[in-house]
Image (cartoon, rainbow, N blue to C red):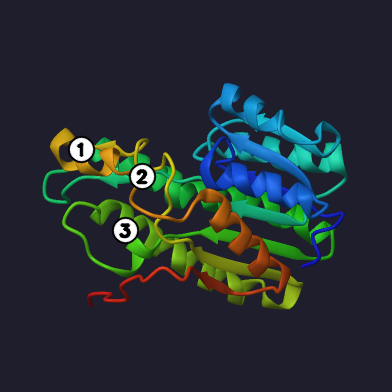
Amino acid sequence: MDLNGKVALVTGASGGIGEALAVDLQEEGASVVLFARRANELERVLARLDPNRAAIVVGDVAVREDVERAVHTAEERFSGLDLLINNAGVAVVARISDVPLDLIERGWRTNVLGPIHSIQAAVPAIRRRGGGMIVNVSSGMSLRASATMGIYSMTKAALNLISASLRQELAGENIRVMTVFPGFIANDFGLNSLAADEALIADRRATSRTRSNRTSEDASRDIIAAIKVDQEVFRSNVEQSLDVPL
C-alpha cells in the first residue's frame, strides 16, 4: 500500500507502538485518526503531528459506538478510510486456575471484541474507498503456553484466527489483512498490565522498559515497511517460540 494520501485509523494511539505509528504514518503522507481512552495522552500525541492531517477520538474499543465515532470522524474529516490498525490491547497477568472473571472479561473485551468492533465499523468505509488494509497487532505470546499469561495468550491467539479468517472472507474485495508479531518492546505496555496477584506482575512491571533493545519506533518502522509491501504476516527478527501446544 502506498500510504501517501491515505487515511488511517490507529487504536491504542495514546502511547507506545500506536503513537509511533501515528507519527510514521504522517511522515509517509497519510492522515491519521488517533483513538484511545486517555484524552490527555491523545492531546500530547496530537501536538507532535500536523493538525491538518490528524484527529483524535476518545473512546474504548470495547464500546462499539466509540469505534463507530472514530470511523465517522475519518470519513467526515478526511473523506474516507483506507487503513485500520488494531493496536489497542491489554495484558492480563494471572493464573487461569484462579483468575477473577472480571479480568478475563476485560481482556477479551479489549483484545478480541475490540478488534471485531473496529473491523465491523471500518470495513464498510474501506469498501467505499475501493479497498485498503486491516492490520491486527498480535503477540508472540499467542504462539506459546504460559503459566501466568494464559489469558493474554488466548486472546491474542483468537486475534490470529480472526485475521486468518478475515483474510479469506475479504480476499475478493481488495481488502488485505495483516497480522503483526512485534516482539518484545521496551515501552509502558507491561506497566499497564492487569493483574490478579501483584506478586505475579512485579517483575514484568520492573522490567517493562528494559526487557528489550527494541523500541516502539523500531516496531512502527517495521510495521510500516510491511504495510507498504502488502505483507500478510509480519514477525520481528526477535526470537519467538513457536511451541504451540495441542
C-alpha distance separating marks 2 and 3:
10 Å
Q: Residue 202 shows which numbered tag?
A: 1
Identify the residue shown where x is 24% and y is 45%.
Answer: 93
Report which quarter residue 220 is drawn in.
bottom right
The quarter of the image holding the N terminus is: bottom right
Q: Earlier in the sequence, mark 2 or mark 3?
A: 2
Above or below residue 223? Residue 98 is above
Above or below residue 234? Residue 152 is above
Identify the residue shown where x is 54% and y is 38%.
Answer: 15
The quarter of the image holding the C terminus is: bottom left
> Which residue is label 3 attached to?
153
Residue 228 or residue 71, whichever sits in front? 228
Q: Which of marks 2 and 3 is in front?
A: 3
C-alpha distance separating marks 2 and 1:
19 Å
Density class for disc 2 (Cα within 10 Å; few <14, some 14-19, many ≥20) is: many
Query: What's the amino acid at mark 2?
Result: Gly
Residue 145 or residue 162, whichever sits in front? 145
Query: What's the amino acid at mark 1?
Result: Ala
SS at circle 3: helix
